[in-house]
Amino acid sequence: MSKKMALLFSVLLAVGLVFFFRSGTGTGEEARRQTLKPGSLSGEVRQAEGLYERLPKTLDPKSVRLCFRGEELACDRDTDTWYLPVDMDSALWESGIFTDFEEGVRILPLLDYTALEKQAVVAEGQSVPLLAWNEAEESCTQIHVVFTGLPVVRMETDADLDIDTVFAGSVVFYEDCGRQDWTFSSVFQANERGQTTRAFPKKGYRVNLITVTSTGAVNENPHPILGMRRSDSWIFYAIYSDGTKVRDRFGIELWNGFGAENTGYDSHYGTHLEYAELIVNGEYRGLYGIMEPVDCTQLQISDQEYLYKRTLGRELLPELFDLTAPDDYLNVLGMEIKGRDGNGSRADWKCFRDYVELSGAPDEIFSEGMEQLLDMGNTTDMWLYLQMIYGEDNIYKNMFFAFKKEPDGYRMYLVPWDVDMSWGNVYNGVEEDLYTTHDPERAEQYLEWPMLDRMLALDIGGIRERVRKRWESLRQEELSDGRMEAVLGECIHQVQDSGAFARDAARWPDSAHDGDYDSLRAFMERRMNFLDKNIENMDEWIQE
């Protein structure tokens, strides 16, 4: 069977699975947010203890399909443990009844978890026992539920994710179970993604939500996942090499606080990331960051505008655009184009080729051209952002270039991507180190960026003063020490107090899980002090 036919078969199979998942959806009354009083399950626990003592333990736990408020939950079948997302910032337990998907099997708690401190149960990943019993067959078994502070994603596919790089199936997104609409289901098509990270056992994916008509036609199925924008395409970032599990989320939140909205356009020049725990085919796969793609929809790129991404670190020379066909630009130039059929035509690459040519032009042409081409506010923000996080990995790759058509010609805007190599973490090329090392001395080093270094040296558009004033303003508000610590603290809270960090470490013992937030904070403090001192004396610093 061809890959295309196999993928279509998987999609059609998944349509049935989605219907199967949704057949147990709860009612509107059940969906209202209510909470349980401490000790409210003591009667059910006594009943469960009596049944567990009396009944033979012959019910197969693999036959149990645990539901909460009518929604079938995701299960790790190796341990017969189900995952239920709750609001970890509330001390109150969400109300709702555990049931089995099939009639005849009843569920009762063997522990009154409402008498426990909820936030400690979640943070410690405590496994709470439940009794599943079949009254007609006079049999029972013990199963477990983990209350997680993060959303959960459940995938079902007929693919082997250790082998297949393109696959399809069904997916359910579970949010805090106390919400009214706390689940969403869809069919999906997906492919493995990433460059260096493809070598890691924990894979990243691009997941495209779809619908399939009765005739087999596949259509996009956009939906606002986990509070983010409405989209049919989502990035599942595996967060494998960062031992803190917060660098990307922290960097994204900082950029969103000052740079993503500072373009003059009513669109978001960045992304968002929400944490979730992934379970595929009954196997716990760990902590993931689900991200909006930076695409033409996100940036409102029209048919007459262009969006390019620098994916690989390659030398950009104008003549390479002439010597290489567009379908090989990724290999030769490390560049790809978004929103065009395939790799586009040579005409679709003209904007970026002109930018590369301008970058190597004599000073007078370079100065005049860059001031006209670049949005100086966006350029200033990007330089400050990369200097702040020491984003060395984003100078030669992991950057989007958006060319917006404005009355006086095209204007170029920069959008960052993949900022896990930041705050002292740098690429070292050693597989045994997961290609990452921490270098605290970078905190007091200037980050070289040839294009911006040249602009600063020539003071194009008065960029030095722009930088100084913008930094002074940002340090009072968006990048104040207090706000940065608050943003970092919330990121740490998400991965640690949800219990997900420890579960991910147990699932992927060869990945990085040092949880070294002290080193991150120390680097951040040194870096911000270094920039405060030098940006205040911008002219002297640049001339050094």
Image (cartoon, rainbow, N blue to C red):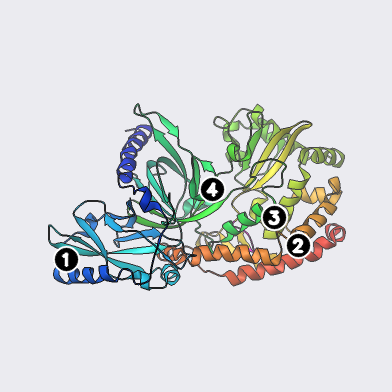
State the separation of the CA atoms marked 3 and 4.
Answer: 25 Å
Q: Residue 386 carries which label?
A: 3
Nearest-to-viewer mark from 3 and 4: 4
The type of residue carrying mark 4 is Met
Residue 404 rendering spot, x and y as whole percentages? 70, 35
- Residue furthest front in the image: 29
Residue 503 rendering spot, x and y as whole percentages? 42, 64
Residue range highlighted in magenta? 420-424
State the separation of the CA atoms marked 1 and 4.
Answer: 45 Å
Q: In this image, 88 relative to 16: left or right?
A: right
State the separation of the CA atoms marked 2 and 4.
Answer: 28 Å
Q: Residue 228 carries which label?
A: 4
In this view, 58 is above or below 366:
below
In this view, 305 is above or below 375:
above
User: Could you tell which of marks 3 and 4 lies nearer the N-terminus?
Assistant: 4
- Residue furthest left in the image: 137
User: Could you tell which of marks 2 and 1 lies nearer the N-terminus?
Assistant: 1
Q: Mark 2 points at which residue?
A: 476
Q: Mark 1 points at which residue?
A: 57
Q: Mark 2 near mark 4, Cβ–Cβ under 8 Å?
A: no
Residue 264 rendering spot, x and y as whole percentages? 72, 42
In this view, 85 is above or below 19:
below
Q: In this image, 79 relative to 419: left or right?
A: left
Of helix, strand and loop, which mostly describes the magenta segment? loop
